[in-house]
Image: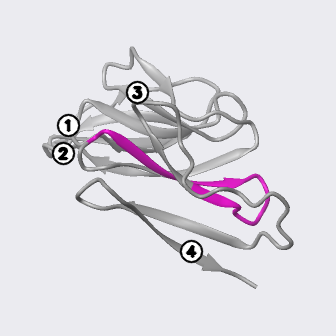
Amino acid sequence: MSVDVSPNGKMIVFDLLGDLYTLLIGGGKATRLTSGMAFDAQPRFRPDGKRVVFVADRIGGDNVWIVNLDAKDTVQLTKGNNSLFLSPAWTSDGKYVIASKSGRSVVPRSSGCITSTAAPAQLIKEPTQPERPRYSHRYSHSYSHTRCRYAKRNTA
């Protein structure tokens, strides 16, 4: 279960059994944001609190999606049936989404930043024929919004 607090501190968004919900911070009845057969998870509020980024397997692969809080407008940011996007997060200006990407294998393959305002752009290119694809990346953004930092972990 993933939980995020809205920027104004008045609401939370969380995933439960593959659906996303919002709930006022003081309690009450949760409002379902997404539903259906897809597994929606890892929600994160945009800094203005109006949209939520999340990961879902709606078309087969785990891709990055954005939904408005009124649940009327859902946008798919990434495409692919063999992708596994993880840990989406907004940059502090709300213009970009950062997510890690790996393949469906046990070992992660690559990662990259993706934008929410244009076509997705992968920052780290996947090797064409790696001998042993045993590495992964985790991303964070700089507060100036000009750089995307990452840490690379090599495993034996």
In the image, residue 107 lies in the stretch drawn in magenta: yes
Residue 67, disc: 3
* Residue 7 numbered tag: 2
Quote the CA–CA distance across marks 4 and 3.
30 Å
Considering only vertical position in the picture, is 113 above or below 31?
A: below
Magenta residues (range): 94-111
Q: Nearer the viewer, residue 51 or 142?
A: 142
At which x and y percent is residue 73?
A: 41, 17
From the viewer's perspective, is 44 left or right of 101? Answer: left
Image quadrant containing the C terminus: bottom right
Please indicate whether residue 149 sits to the left or right of residue 145 in the image: right
Label 2 Cα neighbours within 10 Å, binned few <14 / some 14-19 / many ≥20: some
- The residue type indicated by label 3 comes to Val
The answer to which of marks 4 and 3 sits earlier in the sequence is 3
Mark 4 or 3, closer to the camera = 4
Q: Position of residue 62 (x, y in %)?
A: 64, 41
Q: Give whichever of 24, 123 is nearer the camera.
A: 123
Q: Position of residue 111 (x, y in %)?
A: 59, 57
Of the residues under marks 3 and 2, which one precedes in the sequence? 2
